[in-house]
């Protein structure tokens, strides 16, 4: 990824595109796109972007009936958000996890 600003824009654009695909019923396409995005995000220091992408990955996985994998992605997102101090994202991520697992934490 080039510079931090370019990386952020690219990650955000692809994350939003993948989220749109999931919501339009194209979960397989979304999963392919978000997994590429995650690979790139893991090579940066943009922890919030990585966590946001993990949440979209979880949406795609849940839409494909892969609840365990979706929960794992959300647990990873929570861990990153907590370590980075992105507290505002914790509650929505926990709600998303609860919706998938039925387990309130």
Image (spheres, rainbow, N blue to C red):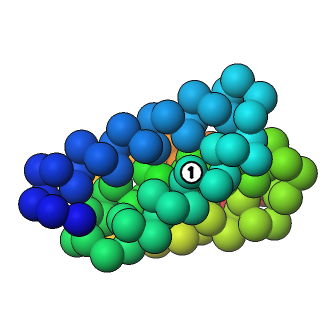
Residue 9 is situated, as x and y percent measured from the top left of the image, at: 24, 43
Q: Residue furthest top?
A: 24
Q: Residue at x 22, y 71 (%)?
A: 45
Helix, strand, or loop for circle 1?
helix
Left or right? Give the position of 10 relative to 98.
Answer: left
Q: Quadrant of residue 82?
A: bottom left
Dot 1, how many residues are within 10 Å of its Cα: few (below 14), some (14-19), or many (20+)? some
Residue 71 shows up from this direction: yes
Question: Where residue 33 sits: x, y (%)?
Answer: 56, 51
Quadrant location of residue 67? bottom right
The foreground one among 68 and 92 is: 68
* Numbered-mark total: 1
Does residue 54 appear in the picture of this structure?
A: no
Please tell me which residue lies in front, 53 or 103.
53
Would you say 46 lies left or right of 5 here?
right
Q: In the rendered image of this protein, does residue 63 appear above or below residue 90?
A: above
Pointer 1: what residue?
33
Where in the figure is residue 1, as x and y percent of width and height? 23, 65
Q: Position of residue 26 (x, y in %)?
A: 74, 34
Residue at the location (69% across, 44% down)? 29
Residue at the (22%, 55%) spot, across then down: 7
Residue lying at 89% horizontally and 51% vertically, measured from the top left: 65
Q: Is residue 9 above or below residue 35?
A: above
Check the picture and name the quadrant holding the C terminus: bottom right
**Is 48 situated left or right of 60 in this image?**
left
Q: Decide: is 48 above or below 26.
A: below
């Amino acid at each position: 990824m080039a510079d931090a600003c370019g990386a952020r824009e690219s990650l955000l654009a692809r994350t939003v595109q993948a989220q749109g695909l999931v919501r339009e019923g194209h979960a397989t396409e979304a999963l392919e796109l978000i997994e590429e995005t995650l690979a790139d995000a893991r090579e940066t220091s943009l922890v919030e972007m990585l966590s946001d992408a993990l949440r979209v990955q979880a949406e795609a996985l849940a839409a494909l009936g892969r609840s365990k994998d979706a929960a794992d992605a959300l647990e990873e997102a929570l861990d990153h958000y907590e370590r980075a101090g992105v507290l505002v994202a914790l509650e929505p991520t926990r709600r998303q996890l609860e919706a998938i697992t039925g387990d309130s934490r």
